[in-house]
Amino acid sequence: MALRKIVYDGEPLLRKQSREVKDITPRIRTLIEDMWETLYVENGVGLAAPQVGVLRRVIVIDTTPPPDDSDEDDEAKSDDDGMDSPVKPANDSVDEAPPVPQKYTLINPELVWVSEETQCSKEGCLSVPGRIATVTRPAKVRVKALDEEGQPIDIEADGLLAKALQHEIDHLNGIVIVDIADEVEDVRSDKD
């Protein structure tokens, strides 16, 4: 595995359509491994191949909450449900059971259904550092794709997973959050 360099907003590559993966070759498997390593090093929730300079329809998503050694109140730390936020909030749906790990490698993902109900929340992006975007998206989605073994997978999602799926599929279609945001906030000055 190798760490890949993140492509930042302003690079024309991020506005291009990604190509379908026809065969899961050793090169695609290496890309997937590298994307996982890059995602975790960068503390992200999701990553699309174009974000590491490869125009192929591959995404990785892990909405599994990090291990929590502190109080439960820490779950409410941030209102930012950013795709690439350093704080990975639990799934937004209200359940009594602990959040279920939601880790996916998706090849050629396709949104096949979206709800009429929407959700508006803040999102971050590894390709747009220092800015947080307020984005309105469908609250629930259904996605069909292939997993890393080439087997069909069908995901119905809401909450953070639904947002992450839409965010990363947008990248495959040449869309960056600043293109669809209701509002973009510059948070770089907060770090001074």
Image (tube, helix red, strand yellow):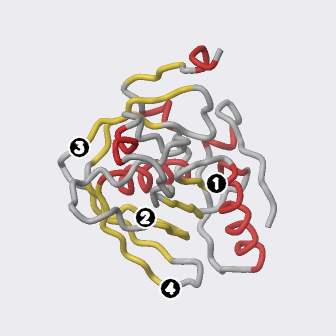
* Residue at (54, 26) in percent of width and height: 131
Q: Identity of the amino acid at label 1?
A: Leu
Separation of residues labelled 4 and 2 (CA atoms) = 14 Å
Q: Where is mark 1, residue-wise? A: 39
Query: What residue is drawn where x is 51% and y is 52%?
Result: 168
Counting residues from the start of the chain, the first of labels 4 and 2 encountered is: 2
Disc number for residue 151: 4
Residue drawn at 56 percent across, 61 percent down: 59
Q: Which of the image's four quarters has the C terminus?
A: top right
First in residue order: circle 3 vs circle 2: 2
Disc 2 marks which residue? 110
Q: Residue 179, relative to residue 92: is it above or below?
A: above
Q: Residue furthest right?
A: 2
Residue located at (51% from left, 37% from top) = 124
- As measured in the structure, the alpha-carbon distance from the residue carrying label 3 to the one carrying label 2 is 19 Å
Camera-near label (1 vs 4) is 1
Q: Position of residue 55 (x, y in %)?
A: 67, 56
Q: Secondary structure at mark 3?
A: strand
Residue carrying label 3: 118
Residue 90 image offset from top left, x and y in percent:
38, 53
The answer to whether mark 4 and mark 2 are in CB contact below 8 A is: no
